[in-house]
Amino acid sequence: MRQILLAAGLLMFAGSVFAAGKSCEELKSEIAAKLDAKGVSGYSLEIVDKGSAADGKVVGTCEGGSKEIVYKRG
């Protein structure tokens, strides 16, 4: 449970810190590296169009804010 809360906090921070102008693949790789370094496992990161993240948590934006990176646990 503690690990999940740590991951959620990290993801909230990651979404606000990363520049919106980064390429989506670059940003996705950076977020994944941070999660892996914290020992988080069993997650997925998906690049979607802005506003279509129905069943996940938005952890970053890219391509000038037109795309979002969504974190899903499971």
Image: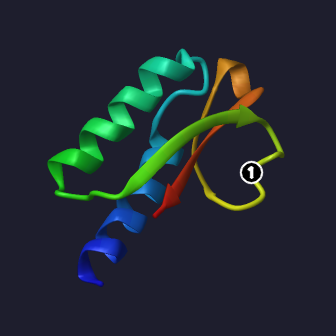
Image quadrant of residue 27? top left
Residue that appears at 25% across and 81% down:
2
Residue that appears at 77% across and 26% down:
66
Q: Amino acid at mark 1?
A: Ala
Q: Nearer the viewer, residue 37 or 61?
A: 37
Residue that appears at 82% across and 46% down:
52
Q: Nearer the viewer, residue 10 or 49?
A: 49
Residue that appears at 48% across and 58% down:
12
Image quadrant of residue 13? bottom left
Mark 1 neighbour class, 10 Å CA radius: few under 14, some 14 to 19, many 20 or more = some
Secondary structure at badge 1 equals loop
| Image location (x, y in percent) of residue 23 | 54, 15
In the shown orientation, is residue 69 left or right of residue 64?
left
Q: Nearer the viewer, residue 4 or 42?
A: 42
Residue with the mark numbered 1 = 53
Image quadrant of residue 30? top left
Q: Relative to 3, is 60 above or below?
A: above
| Image location (x, y in percent) of residue 5 | 35, 76
In the shown orientation, is residue 32 left or right of residue 58?
left
